Amino acid sequence: MNLWELFVALVLGFIEGMTEFAPISSTGHMIIVDDLVFQSKNLFSAPVANTFKVVIQLGSILAVVVVFRDRFLNLLGLQRQNTADHKPGDRLKLAQVILGLVPFGVLGLLFEDFIDEHLFSVRTVIMGLLLGAVLMLLADHFRPQRVAAETVDQLTYKQALGMGLFQCLAMWPGFSRSGSTISGGVLLGLSHKAAADFTFIMAVPVMMGASFLSLLKNWSYMTQDALPFFVVGFISAFVFALISIRFFLKLIHRVKLAPFALYRIALAAVIYWLYF
């Protein structure tokens, strides 16, 4: 393991951390990374490269857990919530999170093989980037004039289920889990900040479960030679995801979704130029 490979791990962790939870599609960015790093430089075999992607994704997930640690402790009944700033009964419930996860879980089990076999291509990712951008622009334009839920604690069961349904759009590579789910929340009457909060909270169990299953399948590729590469990537993804999430949660209230949608369109153009 040389310094160049560790530097590559640092950069890839940066890309994962900065793009995983912003509504700009980490999949779209990783396509460029695959072309410029893994395939052209032949650093590692495909199985090791795929395992590395799982490892750095776990780093990003850990950052969400840290940012929302008090919220998760409240949901699990391990810590009392400060109710001074809330009306009686205003509190996000674990049942609402579970309800939001059901659509994605059911459709994921039914169509996982189909998605893996037919939807993971450069063309489908470009389509996902563009369609996701359109959804985000529509969400900003047609959002209700009156916000029904300023904070995630005011979320209703109906809104939780609705956001869960919108999250299913992220099964199409390039659509972006954050982009589709936040857009759905905004259309359903949540503030951009409340929609982002619930999106990140729902992402943890979904991504953690999928990542651990993938890691178990690919555990044999966690060799001693590749371990420093994995460790640097994991730490890098964690640190930069921590920065990205905190910054995004402050930014989304001010700029809404349109700037991210325009960035997605530009990214789709870059990928098209590289591949076609």
Image (cartoon, rainbow, N blue to C red):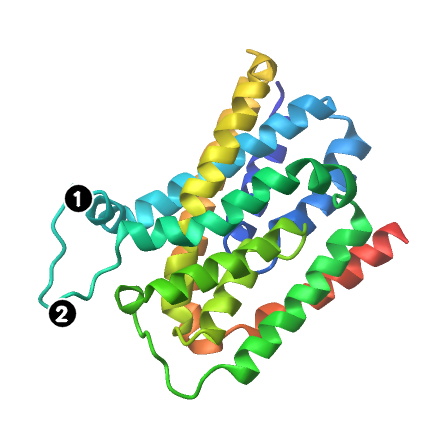
Which x, y percent locates residue 220? Answer: 59, 12
1 left or right, relative to 256: right
User: Pointer 1: what residue?
Assistant: 77
In the rendered image, the quadrant that contains the C terminus is bottom right
Q: Amino acid at mark 1?
A: Gly
Which x, y percent locates residue 188? Answer: 45, 73
Which x, y percent locates residue 149? Answer: 32, 74
Looking at the image, is mark 2 or mark 1 earlier in the sequence? 1
**Which-is-in-front pick, marks 2 and 1?**
1
Please report the residue visible at 55 percent of the width from the left and 36 percent of the height from the top.
Answer: 10
Number of numbered discs on residues: 2
Vertical position of residue 52 compared to residue 127: above or below: above
Q: Is residue 260 visible?
A: yes
Say few, some or many: other residues with alpha carbon within 10 Å of mark 1 (under 14 / 14 to 19 / 20 or more): few
Q: Is residue 249 visible?
A: no
User: Pointer 2: what residue?
Assistant: 85
The residue most toward the bottom is 145
